[in-house]
Amino acid sequence: MSELAVFDGLPPLEGAARVKFLESMLKTKIQDNDGSDTGVIIYCAIILFLTGVFLSFVWFNRKYRPLRAKTIKLCTLMYLATIPWALGDFQMNGLVSIKGGWAHCRFWVVWMRILFSFLYSTLVTLRFYALDRIFIQGKPYKGRALYVPAISLFIVLLGYCLTCQFINVYHVSYYFKYASICVVDDRYRYVSVGLIWVPWCGVLFFAFRIRSIQSSFNELYESLFTCALGFLILIKTTVVHATHPYYLFAKGFRHSETIIDVTATNLIVWIMLGYPAYQCLFNRENYDREWAKKLRTDGYASKYSAEFDSTPNETTSYSRMNDSMFEHNKMGTKDFYDKDPLDTIRMLSANGGGTLTSNTIPSPNSVYRPPLSNLEFGSMNDGSMDSFDNPMDGRTDFRRII
């Protein structure tokens, strides 16, 4: 590319003269910017705005348990990474005139498009790794398990971008002022496209491992759609860069490149959070109860509580159930969340018994009514499971009912 430096002292070409020069130099037809490029930018802005509104709703309802189990923070970081990635696409794909601030080619190519496309892919990998660690390995995703992989991957990304920043500009991307374009070195192009396959191969690996997560988290279908969209971006980018290195001068290629990138990356966020968000909006209480029951049926209650309710024990005990199956009301007391005391008794019986404390008694402002007329709760001192078997104390043997 250094041979193009002979044109640097000449005044930049404009209009038809610029197009004619590019066609003679690149041996391809040039389709310059027009209103359709602006339309693509507006479409992308709308998609990013709608996803931002959606995530605002998710954060407003972040205490809703089915949403909280979906690693909201990582999904939010993924969305934030799509914004500079899209801006880098606008510049590198030729949707804007390369003048003024857009003429800083290495900044837009390296620090916006490449860095944040890598970062997005890495965040997807980390999310799948988190699910694998929690639900497959049965280990907490905290401390070194959280920070070491994240920091290590970030150092690798930062190191690659810094290397691209400090090597010869002609080996990366530079501004060819005479024709008002950014010229990207082929070696840099192919290395960057090849490297982005690495995190997505990691996504595929962890997606295979978490395939057994049951219906309470529904990660099987989410992981399939995520991998399909991710590899759609990868294959599309690889094929286009390998077969049409000057794709930015063809409307169809530059539009499809940008639209697929923005749509697919935002759609992945919607897929990960969409279903529980929909239920939160239209079927909040019923879905939460059904989800909690599925969680227990699938055997993930203790893992969910350990990771998301900050409960230290690993076994399903009454203290865990008290945190993960009860909620605080406005008066500061705890009411039974599933509105069914028999679930409490079944859980206690299955885990060797325990003590039913006064926390299980509905507070004065609770809507709960006992389903059985002879159902009574004792105090903290006399409400043990052993007392249920004593016919002299006037209570019903609930283990027989169960």
Image: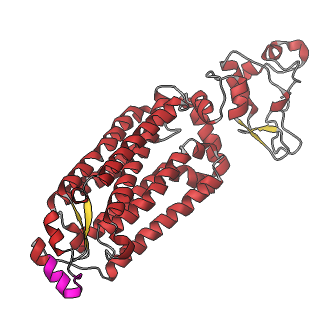
Q: Name the image quarter holding the N terminus.
A: bottom left
- In the rendered image, residue 47, in percent from the top left (x then y), is placed at 45, 66
Residue 181 in the magenta stretch? The answer is no
Residue 224 lies, with reference to residue 10, above or below; the image says above
Residue 12 lies, with reference to residue 52, above or below; the image says below
In the image: residue 134, left or right of residue 232: right
- In the rendered image, residue 199, in percent from the top left (x then y), is placed at 34, 42
In the image: residue 360, left or right of residue 48: right
Name the residue nearer the viewer: 313 or 31: 31
In the image: residue 385, left or right of residue 142: right
- Is residue 402 visible in the rendered image? The answer is no
- In the rendered image, residue 346, in percent from the top left (x then y), is placed at 69, 24
- Is residue 328 visible in the rendered image? The answer is yes
Residue 355 lies, with reference to residue 374, above or below; the image says above
Chain part drawn in magenta: 11-22
Instruction: Look at 66% across and 19% down and name the residue there.
Output: 350
- In the rendered image, residue 290, in percent from the top left (x then y), is placed at 61, 41
Instruction: Look at 89% across and 42% down and name the residue there.
Output: 364
Instruction: Look at 50% across and 35% down and name the residue there.
Output: 147
